[in-house]
Image (cartoon, grey):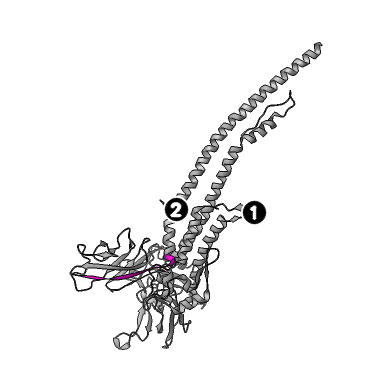
Amino acid sequence: MPVGNVTGLSSGIQWDETVKLLMQIEHRPVDMLELRRSTYESQLTNWSAIESKISALQDRAAELDTLKEFLQKSGSSSDSDVLTVTASADAIAASHDVIVNQLATSAVHVHQTGWADANSTAVNSSGSNKSFSYDYEGTTITVTVADSTTLQGLVNLINRDSNNPGVAASIVNDGTGGGSDYHLVMTGTDTGAGNDVTIIDTLANPTDIGALGTEFDEAGWDTTQAAQNAQIRVDGIPDPGWGYSWIESDSNSVDDVIPGVTLQLKNTSGGNPVQVDISMDNAAIKSSVKGLIAAFNDVVSTINSTTRYDAENETAGPLAGDALARNLKSELMNLIAQNIPGTDSGDALRSLGQAGVKLSSGGGMALDETAFDEALVQDALGVARLFAFDSVSSSTYFTVRSHGEDTVGGTYNWTVSYDASGGLDSGGTNTVDGNNGIVHGTQILEGARNSDVAGLLMSLTNPGDGPNTKSGTVKVYTGLSVLLYNHIADMVESTDGSFKLNRDRIGNSVDLLDQQITSWEKRLESIEKGYNSRFSAMETLIGQMKNMGNYLNSIG
């Protein structure tokens, strides 16, 4: 906003400075509005930081909200030169003996006829186009080889062919120095007996390149490595008496023999078994829990720093007095302090504190590693249920399939009716926790909406005695990771979550202040013009009076 520009030639008064000082006084309401605006902008910035930390915490929680994710396993091998082991949470802690009879290999075929060089001697000197055909994994490919194409040119044609199903062509120098050192090599990129490379010298476009038209035919190739399957025996299975001696795999990465376990085969074992041990990876579990705790503490630390009040210096954080921030911290602390929903007197572990996870003085989480390690050794499943989702049904015919964000941990009665085919009878009694459930198809029953079992999906397996009705109970555990994820999901909901409403509230306040500031600035422009106008008139009057005085003095 411009300041006064009235000159003081007649009066000697610096009117522009006077206007500037007066406008500083007039500008004070705007200064107050801008200060309030700055406060709101600071709140938005700090809430953005909290939301970022909250999202990171939710991501961490999502990594530990199932038993499979929590109960991490590790695998070891008694001979890592023969095989190595990795295990997922699906693996069962046990030991196995594995014999590796042979490795899976890819096909390697070397052309017998050597060429004097790779880049000048033509493999086709017929004066016209010729063909090179091969088969891989049941796909036949024909490459057109132009006259004067060299060995390197042929390699390029094969490798750059968009229809190439997975064969790598290369050149090897045999080092004999006899003028025919360079050989074409065809290598399959996939291991397994079904992935052989075959040179085709029949069909519509047979291989016919070479000076004699036969050098590249199938008979002119040596198989230096056959395509074969890996062969293993696990815990004596299969017994040779069964009619086959080995479990075969087209890959050296075998992940479908021992559930949840991947065997990476590296060498044969010479008939000797290699011991594979699968065990609970307590170190990895504790590391994951520490990661969750660190993310939780990051949120609490950010809230503490933004809501602090320093009484000694009488300074406050940008969110001091913010009810949402206070409530958020309180809600998070309550999730830690409570008994885990779903646990009851039958569970040895009901609270996080029993496993060494407690609240710290600042409202964060602290881990007693010794207590946690002991709890894992004594009751790993119980510890997992303090963090993850789990369920136990009284019947093998009716089990939990999944849960929703509104599912509350607890023990619930259920009753299902099914027909002669073993499918749910939608006209019968199908209840969970005393409320009529929602039937999906013939096997899935969902808990009633707006109830403690909302989102809970239970699956019926044909009991084999229908039509009939069965009843039982299901116990649902919703551990800390589940509670955190669901609580945060409500807060960050894009339509009516508390974070969204909070941003809107602060944003609306900023918009209103912007309108008020704009209105004031227009008013100040008018006030400044008024000052300039009055001081200009005063300066003019002083000039006139000064001129009149000079005139009177001159005639006196």
Q: Examine the rendered structure and indicate whether residue 91 appears above or below residue 25.
A: below
The magenta stretch spans residue 336 = no
Q: Residues within 10 Å of mark 2 (few under 14, many from 20)?
A: some
Q: Which residue lies furthest to the right in this view?
A: 556
Quadrant position of the N terminus in the picture: top right
Q: Quadrant of residue 530?
A: top right
Where disc 1 sits, the SS reads loop
Numbered badge on residue 313: 1
Three-letter code, disc 2: Ser
Where disc 2 sits, the SS reads helix
Q: Examine the rendered structure and indicate whether residue 144 appears above or below residue 187.
A: above
Q: Nearer the viewer, residue 33 or 244?
A: 33
Q: Does the residue at mark 1 contact the one at mark 2 (Cβ under 8 Å)?
A: no
Q: Nearer the viewer, residue 344 or 18?
A: 344
Is residue 101 among the parts visible in the rendering? yes
* Residue at 21% in and 68% down: 418
- Distance, label 1 to label 2, CA atoms, is 32 Å
| Upstream in sequence: badge 1 or badge 2 | 1
| Percent position of residue 543, x then y | 72, 20
| Percent position of residue 504, x then y | 46, 47
The magenta stretch spans residue 463 = yes
* Residue at 51% in and 43% down: 510
Q: How crowded is mark 1: few (under 14 residues within 10 Å), some or many (20 or more)?
A: few
Residue that badge 2 annotates: 498
| Residues rendered magenta in the picture | 462-482
| Percent position of residue 235, x then y | 37, 85
Three-letter code, disc 1: Asn
